[in-house]
Amino acid sequence: MSGSSVESLTDRVYIEQVRSLYLHLLPAAAMWAAFAITFWLAYSRTPEPSLLPLGIAGIAASSLRIGLTAHYRDLALTGALDRAQARRLELLFSLPYFAFALILGLFGMLVFRSPVPEIHMLTICIIVGFCAGTATSCGFRPRLAIASILAAVGPVILVSAFLSDPAYLAMAFIAASFVLGAARSIVVRVEATKAEIAGRLVSISLARRDILTTLPNRLALQEYFDEHAVLISSHQPIAVHYLDLDGFKPVNDQYGHATGDALLLAVSDRLRGSVRSGDLVARIGGDEFAIIQFGLHHADEAALLARRIIAAIEQPFIIENHSLVISASVGTAVSHDRNQQLDSLLKAADAKLYEIKQARRNSSMFAMTA
């Protein structure tokens, strides 16, 4: 593999990891509410004047995090990102996130210096919840995750270690052990996931690749579906996307088959970078592709991927000094039935694709006659 290919693969893995930061909003809202309640109870029972500015700052930082995540979520999950854009999105997420972790740590330190055990209990609960959420939602960015966990729980460990009560000393020791274990787990998980993403992005075995694009072929798609469909919970839907390229034939006719092949290679590369870890994109013929999504929490995640694919393909392609603009049409079929076969899902997705293209033609004809 050439140096440029390795660099491109590294960038795509990084972009995939940054996308994961913007997947979930509900845990952030729950943390906002939990912190606000804990702050109100602590401030009402503890005569510590420093709690008020810390509480207000914590609510402000958490609100900013929620607002930025909501504002940029669509771009992060559907946009055709390069490394610079992904880096900016990571910073926009990380700054308020780490600021809240610091504030939460200082807040916990002040609370643990007060003689109100029930508030200590609430505070350690919210800190543990924050650390667990950090390991889950930010685990693919280990520096952010580990730094945030240390910032949130470190001050409480220090204060507890200097209290004379054996229970607090034990808590400090246990918490420190958990932090070390969590840091190790995050690093191991990230390395394993990076390898998995990289493996997916470079496709699977040569015997099951499309010769031109090196994407999985129809056989690999079928095998992947058969292997994974039985492992997914019945509560999680499966999505199959069927897509083709709009405007590909004129490019092929005008510039020749060599340019058309180069364009298909570039499209394949963008599709690899658009799907999530665990999804599979395959070329099933000509300018037609299929994508399988497993492990969805909500059916609207399928629509989100379709929009991301469309946005990625709409960006101009630079092929042999030509700026080529095409688009993609995507038909999607979503099912909860584990017994449904891939062929039937592909047919349903293809039927949706036909409806979309037919509706677009009818709209164009109406506009021309209006």
Image (cartoon, grey):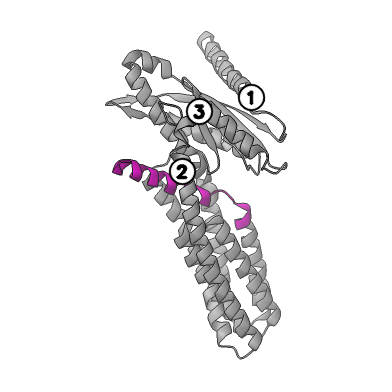
Residue 304 location, x and y as percent?
A: 57, 37
Q: Which residue is mark 3?
A: 217
At a point 55% along the width and 79% down the height, the residue shown is: 157
Give the quarter of the image for residue 359. top right
Q: Quadrant of the C terminus?
A: top right
Give the quarter of the image for residue 52. bottom right
Q: Residues within 10 Å of mark 2 (few under 14, many from 20)?
A: few
- The disc labelled 2 sits on which kind of residue? Gly
At a point 67% along the width and 42% down the height, the residue shown is: 232
Residues in magenta, as a range: 1-28
Q: CA distance from mark 3 to mark 2?
A: 16 Å
Q: Nearer the viewer, residue 22 or 265?
A: 265
Q: CA distance from mark 1 to mark 2?
A: 26 Å
Q: CA distance from mark 1 to mark 3?
A: 14 Å
Compare marks 1 and 2 and give the one earlier in the sequence.
2
Q: Which residue is mark 1?
A: 343
- The disc labelled 1 sits on which kind of residue? Asp
SS at mark 1? helix
SS at mark 2? helix
At a point 53% along the width and 81% down the height, the residue shown is: 158
Residue 179 location, x and y as percent?
A: 54, 71
> Which disc number belongs to residue 94?
none
Q: Is residue 163 left or right of residue 336?
A: left
